[in-house]
Image: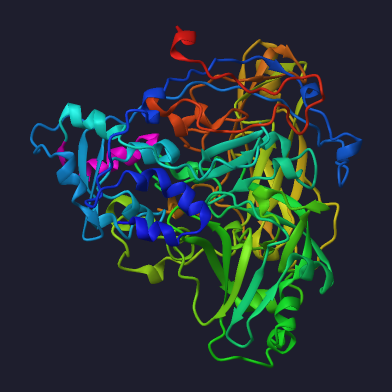
């Protein structure tokens, strides 16, 4: 367990984060009861149910100050905003009279890696076997040992979705008395390392708030070829650092070169600027598609579908920096030089968790020395300095690779004979066989056959229909056709050569029109291709509409890349326990209403959340507290989520579709 002496060695943010918790520790790890803790201020939140006709006029193209980098084809037009519904509430450990009663003092004695006990709402758990299996890293599990989890989960609310507490029941060894259970949940306040987070656009769907992970409203992705910075998906593993650019340092060291340090000014003045347009996609995009009662995913965030965006990045080639440090990158790229022990490039970032562990990962050295690989240290995004959420002042861009390999807030580049040993490299983004799951295999790390679980690097071919949006009712009166719009991309620089679309769930297909206003080299197609197609409605559908019948459509797309790889139809054959590299057909559930005029769009309040994709949650354009990740009533109130008062595409007149949080009294 971390002691006061350990905290003194940590950097300022870690000390700030740990201070309140460590201040109440006794030698046996016990946290003193704090009657003024935040537990007495929890309150319930309610979401107003809303649905109504929304037209494309509620969202406008960028104004003169935000001019589109590339004009869209006439078929690429803005789409509407929507509201959400309340989610179920869970997380109550069942009564267990068959198990012994423990005191908090007894639990507090089990606070090292040889014996890890925890309490939560009166239940006592022995999670010692889970020490190395924790997706967030073993140090965090050790930090909370011997204590109650409620204060920690007030910050990390993704644990409260329901299935985590259900899984923990298998490790339950006893209970607290009712009085001690109440005292334990309010025993201390865990320092919040996320108090200085950036303010986000309300059109990002936050599937976790701490750390913040948000995907743009899908229907906005086809408004521009380059995704506006405010709407570019955000994947944070840890708190966002606030770095003084004058104090920024890049350290380069390792096999084959001498240690060097560079300032931000050095990077901007000593090296030629290089720009590249590339799509980034989180390795776990669409993870929610794999999460259901039969096969559950335990790694956050549970993206719905929008963790993919495209931008123009400006900076310096990593190979130029390595060349300055003495590495013969040209000879290595041509295969004329092999340096023993130099196989990998490790990246370590400034961001870190409460225990001082910094984010990191690695790629093969061949990627960064390749003269055509476009691997850069970026300090600009869409012609402006990087936003804090995207790595200010400097981040790594590795076109064609998964987003998790492209470290933001880059601090160290280390040339090595080994891959990074960080948990985000060795644990989080491995692709396991379908019969390997978290409960049976991954919770007790390491599993037997890591050699059968490759680490995510290059992403598979992907396409997503963005418009019409998911679960919408379209005007069917005098309607003869429907227009589909979307995005397609393939990792490794492979070109999208065709996208087929269907309105009947894949029974019949037709090729869409492709839109890519930039030219990129062979096998360097780093950026996505947008697609659109107006499909004539079959005769039988037109007849049903004439008879006044509603018609349900199942819209779907599949992309073909230059290696003739195509998206699979179903996810079952490649379901994996980490939820990575997900690219089966994405279905969009849409209804034609014969009473609504052509062009009208409404939210469909159906019980089918997201067509045929089998996800269990995810809502758009509302604060994180109001959707599936905060289903727990004791943690459904404000959690510090900071959102702008207007959206990026706000026309200055229309208020953003963000619903209020209601107290219990207001709800009643």
Q: Quadrant of residue 596?
A: top right
The reply to whether residue 108 is visible in this rendering is yes
Find residue 530 and report its horizontal and vertical position in percent. Answer: 76, 46
Q: Residue at 73% across / 20% down in the picture?
A: 655
Question: Main SS of the magenta segment?
Answer: helix
Where is residue 450? Give x, y as percent: 38, 68
Which residue lies most toward the right here? 64
Q: x, y (%) of residue 214? A: 59, 41
Residue at (21% x, 47% y) in the render? 108
> Which residue is at the front of the view, 39 or 340?
39
Q: Is residue 86 above or below residue 379?
A: above
Q: Quadrant of residue 35?
A: top left
Front residue of this view, candidates 295 and 382 = 382
Q: Is residue 569 left or right of residue 156?
A: right
The way the protein has been coloured in the rendering is: rainbow
Q: Position of residue 16 (x, y in %)?
A: 48, 48
Which segment did they paint magenta? Answer: 160-175
Q: Residue at x 19, y 31 (%)?
A: 180
Image side of residue 199 versus residue 121, left or right = right
**Residue drawn at (69%, 31%), measured in percent from left and top?**
644
Q: Is residue 174 magenta?
A: yes
In the picture, the quarter occupied by the N terminus is bottom left
Residue 124 within the segment the image draws in magenta: no
* Quarter location, residue 536: top right
Q: Is residue 224 above or below residue 353?
A: above
Which image quadrant: the C terminus?
A: top left
Of residues 27 and 629, which is closer to you in this image? 27
Q: Is residue 579 visible?
A: no
């Amino acid at each position: 367990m971390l002691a006061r002496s350990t905290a003194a060695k940590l950097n300022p943010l870690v000390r700030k984060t740990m201070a309140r918790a460590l201040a109440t520790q006794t030698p046996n790890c016990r946290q003193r009861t704090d009657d003024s803790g935040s537990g007495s201020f929890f309150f319930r939140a309610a979401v107003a149910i809303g649905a109504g006709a929304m037209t494309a006029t509620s969202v406008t193209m960028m104004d003169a100050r935000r001019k589109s980098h590339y004009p869209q084809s006439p078929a690429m037009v803005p789409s509407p905003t929507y509201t959400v519904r309340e989610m179920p509430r869970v997380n109550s450990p069942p009564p267990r009279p068959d198990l012994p009663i423990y005191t908090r003092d007894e639990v507090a004695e089990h606070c090292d890696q040889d014996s890890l006990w925890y309490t939560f709402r009166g239940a006592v758990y022995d999670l010692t076997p889970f020490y190395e299996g924790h997706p967030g890293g073993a140090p965090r599990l050790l930090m909370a040992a011997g204590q109650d989890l409620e204060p920690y989960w007030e910050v990390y609310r993704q644990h409260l979705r329901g299935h985590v507490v259900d899984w923990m029941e298998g490790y339950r060894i006893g209970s607290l008395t009712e009085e001690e259970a109440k005292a334990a949940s309010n025993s201390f306040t865990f320092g919040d390392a996320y108090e200085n987070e950036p303010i986000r656009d309300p059109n990002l769907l936050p599937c976790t708030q701490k750390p913040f992970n948000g995907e743009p409203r899908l229907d906005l992705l086809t408004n521009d070829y380059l995704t506006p910075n405010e709407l570019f998906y955000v994947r944070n593993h840890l708190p966002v650092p606030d770095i003084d650019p004058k104090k920024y340092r890049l350290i380069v060291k390792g096999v084959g070169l001498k240690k060097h340090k560079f300032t931000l000014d050095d990077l901007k003045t000593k090296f030629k600027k290089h720009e590249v347009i590339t799509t980034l996609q989180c390795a776990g995009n669409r993870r929610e598609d794999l999460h259901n009662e039969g096969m559950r995913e335990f790694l956050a965030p549970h993206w719905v579908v929008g963790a993919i965006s495209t931008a123009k990045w400006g900076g310096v080639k990593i190979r130029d920096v390595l060349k300055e440090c003495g590495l013969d990158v040209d000879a290595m790229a041509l295969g004329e030089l092999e340096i023993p022990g130099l196989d990998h490039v490790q990246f370590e970032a400034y961001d870190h968790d409460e225990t001082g562990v910094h984010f990191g990962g690695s790629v093969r050295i061949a990627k960064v020395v390749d003269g055509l690989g476009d691997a850069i240290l970026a300090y600009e995004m869409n012609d402006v300095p990087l936003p804090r959420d995207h790595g200010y002042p400097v981040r790594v861009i590795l076109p064609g690779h998964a987003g998790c390999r492209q470290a933001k807030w880059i601090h160290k580049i280390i040339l090595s004979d080994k891959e990074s040993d960080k948990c985000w490299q060795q644990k989080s983004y491995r692709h396991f066989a379908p019969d390997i799951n978290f409960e049976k295999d991954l919770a007790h790390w390491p599993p037997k056959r890591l050699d059968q679980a490759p680490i995510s690097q290059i992403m598979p071919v992907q396409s997503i229909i963005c418009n019409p949006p998911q679960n919408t009712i379209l005007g069917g009166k005098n309607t003869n056709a429907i227009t589909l719009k979307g995005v397609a991309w393939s990792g490794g620089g492979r070109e999208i050569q065709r996208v087929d679309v269907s309105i009947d769930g894949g029974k019949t297909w037709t090729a869409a029109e492709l839109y890519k206003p930039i030219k990129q080299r062979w096998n360097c197609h780093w950026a996505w291709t947008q697609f659109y197609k107006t499909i004539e409605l079959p005769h039988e559908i037109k007849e049903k509409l004439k008879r006044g019948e509603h018609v349900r459509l199942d819209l779907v797309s599949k992309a073909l890349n230059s290696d003739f790889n195509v998206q699979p139809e179903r996810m079952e054959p490649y379901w994996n326990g980490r939820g990575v590299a997900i690219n089966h057909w994405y279905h969009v559930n849409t209804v034609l209403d014969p009473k609504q005029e052509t062009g009208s769009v409404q939210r469909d309040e159906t019980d089918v959340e997201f067509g045929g994709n089998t996800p269990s949650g995810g809502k758009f354009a509302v604060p994180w507290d109001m959707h599936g990740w905060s289903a727990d009533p004791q943690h459904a109130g404000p959690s510090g989520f900071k959102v702008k008062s207007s959206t990026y595409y706000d026309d200055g007149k229309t208020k953003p579709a963000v619903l209020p949080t209601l107290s219990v009294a207001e709800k009643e």
